[in-house]
Image (tube, rainbow, N blue to C red):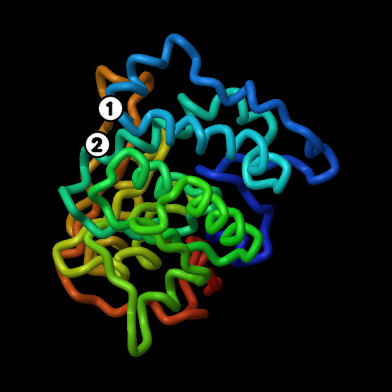
């Protein structure tokens, strides 16, 4: 999502899901598609607790305004709870108490806004480069009453990490926005020393770790660790790659060339 939007490619929706062509956006989506399925009620109750109603309000926002504004695909609306809310919320088991979280390429707020709902102890920054998405995020934060714990910032990770007042967090999250080497280049500079990147990934996570471990090390990251969050609560568990920032390495200069497998330089 983040990488494609910044570079003029095909945009993706939250978690890398295609939002669908604007021509097919429904004018009046049915909010009933966002209702919590009975078979997920126990898991949702365990994860969100007393804030389950708040999670339900956000699910309705995604299924209605989020679909109309092209932030989530119409086909994703009936799967909001299992594919998006619960899948994102269980990542909270890797985040320490009272942490500051930066969600890179937040899109419709996945996972950052979900974590803010599930974990009221967190301070969350939703970092997103596109104006239409930051507008939705700002409206969602206001509608959900999360102004005290959530901040929306329009910008690129590369720019937020530098300058006279750089952004830093204990935890940086990203959901299916790019391969692991590019994610590390964008996100690790935003993590405080000893902080970590939590990248929500899919079935290829183990292969990505092998392929990009050397690049992660060059960027100041420790050895990537694969986690399966929410085991015994959600099915399938969320696949998360954790990378601790164990060395201070400056952000990758914007526009710097990168060698491709063919030996020619390419720009990310």
Q: Is residue 181 visible?
A: no
Seen from the viewer's position, the closer of residues 161 and 219 is 161
Residue 192: x and y in percent read 21, 68
Say which element carries label 1: loop
Which residue is painted at 37% across and 87% down in the image?
A: 163
Q: Is residue 205 visible?
A: yes
Q: Is residue 236 left or right of residue 31?
A: left
Which residue is painted at 62% across and 48% down in the image?
A: 12
Q: Is residue 112 above or below residue 44?
A: below
Q: Is residue 145 left or right of residue 135?
A: left
Seen from the viewer's position, the closer of residues 143 and 103 is 143
Q: CA distance from mark 2 to mark 1?
A: 10 Å
Which class describes the residues within 10 Å of circle 1: few (<14), some (14-19), or many (20+)? many
Q: Is residue 267 above or below residue 203?
A: below
Which residue is painted at 48% across and 80% down in the image?
A: 254
Residue 243: x and y in percent read 24, 54
* Disc number placed over residue 227 in the picture, else none: 2
Are discs 2 and 1 less than 8 Å apart at CB?
Answer: no
Say which element carries label 2: strand
Which class describes the residues within 10 Å of circle 2: few (<14), some (14-19), or many (20+)? some
Q: Is residue 76 above or below residue 69?
A: above
Residue 22: x and y in percent read 80, 46
Task: Identify the image quadrant of residue 27.
Answer: top right
* Disc number placed over residue 140 in the picture, else none: none
- What residue sits right under mark 1 in the picture? 230
For discs 2 and 1, the disc positioned in front in the rendered view:
1
Residue 114: x and y in percent read 40, 42
Considering every residue shown, the one lying at the far bottom of the view is: 164
Which residue is painted at 50% across and 65% down in the image?
A: 260
């Amino acid at each position: 999502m983040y990488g494609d939007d910044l570079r003029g490619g095909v945009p993706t929706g939250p978690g890398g899901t295609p939002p669908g062509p604007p021509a097919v956006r429904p004018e009046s989506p049915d909010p009933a598609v966002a209702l919590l399925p009975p078979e997920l009620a126990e898991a949702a109750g365990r994860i969100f607790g007393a804030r389950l109603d708040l999670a339900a309000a956000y699910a309705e926002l995604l299924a209605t305004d989020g679909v109309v504004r092209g932030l989530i695909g119409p086909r994703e609306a009936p799967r909001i709870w299992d594919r998006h809310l619960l899948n994102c919320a269980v990542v909270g088991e890797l985040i320490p108490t009272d942490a500051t979280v930066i969600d890179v390429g937040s899109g419709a707020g996945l996972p950052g806004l979900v974590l803010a709902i599930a974990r009221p102890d967190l301070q969350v920054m939703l970092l997103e480069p596109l104006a239409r998405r930051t507008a939705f995020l700002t409206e969602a934060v206001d509608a959900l009453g999360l102004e005290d714990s959530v901040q929306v910032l329009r910008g690129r990770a590369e720019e937020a990490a530098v300058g006279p007042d750089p952004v830093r967090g204990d935890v940086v999250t990203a959901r299916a926005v790019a391969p692991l080497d590019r994610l590390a280049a964008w996100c690790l500079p935003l993590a405080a020393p000893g902080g970590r990147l939590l990248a929500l990934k899919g079935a290829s996570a183990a292969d990505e770790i092998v392929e990009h471990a050397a690049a992660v090390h060059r960027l100041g990251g420790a050895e990537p660790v694969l986690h399966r969050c929410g085991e015994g609560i959600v099915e399938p568990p969320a696949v998360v790659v954790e990378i601790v920032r164990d060395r201070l390495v400056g952000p990758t200069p914007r526009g710097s060339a990168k060698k491709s497998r063919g030996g020619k330089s390419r720009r990310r």
